Image (spheres, rainbow, N blue to C red):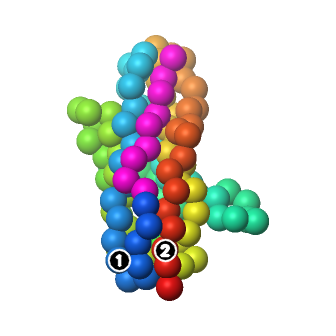
Amino acid sequence: QVQLVESGGGLVQAGGSLRLSCAASGSIFSINYMGWYRRAPGKQRELVAVITSDGSTNYADSVKGRFTISRDNAKNTMFLQMNSLKPEDTAVYYCNADVNITPILSSVYWGQGTQVTVSS
């Protein structure tokens, strides 16, 4: 069993910053990609950013230049530095990871989500 736990959400004014963390624990052999998704009220879940095991990254157009995804492979932890936050960034942010629980068996896991609220 693998658990993903997010932290770092909260309330911030527009233009401010937050740093989200996602810690993976449990029966982990290795982690392939990790990513952040978000779901705003009344909207579908969308990809925010993703990072592979070798550090390659990809971002949604709406956050490019403002958000930075990173990971610490030794600690099975991922981060999302969010700068210049806008009210439209308000959402529940979810951590996602493709985890190898054995050398040949992988599965995708989700965290419980952390609320980010940006006031205007």
Vertical arrangement, residue 13 with respect to residue 55, above or below: below
Residues in magenta? 1-9
Q: Amino acid at mark 2?
A: Val
Q: CA distance from mark 2 to mark 1?
A: 8 Å
Q: Is residue 102 left or right of residue 21?
A: right
Label 2: state its secondary structure: strand
Which is more toward the observer, 30 or 62? 62
Is 24 magenta? The answer is no
Residue at the image point whose x is 54% and y is 23% from the top: 106
Q: Residue furthest left?
A: 74
Which of the two discs, 2 and 1, labels the residue nearer the N terminus? Answer: 1
Q: Amino acid at mark 1?
A: Gly
Q: Is residue 44 left or right of residue 30?
A: right
Q: Is residue 14 visible?
A: yes
Residue 42, position in %: x, y? 76, 65
Residue at the image point whose x is 43% and y is 44% from the top: 6
Residue at the image point whose x is 51% and y is 68% from the top: 117
Residue 77, position in %: x, y? 33, 39
Other residues around mark 2 within 10 Å, as few (<14) / some (14–19) / many (≥20)? many
Residue 69, position in %: x, y? 37, 57
Other residues around mark 1 within 10 Å, as few (<14) / some (14–19) / many (≥20)? some
Residue that badge 2 annotates? 118
* Secondary structure mostly seen in the magenta stretch: strand
Q: Is residue 59 left or right of residue 88?
A: left
Is 7 magenta? The answer is yes
Residue that badge 1 annotates? 16
Query: Disc 2 vs disc 1: Cβ atoms closer than 8 Å?
Result: yes
Which is more toward the observer, 92 or 12? 12
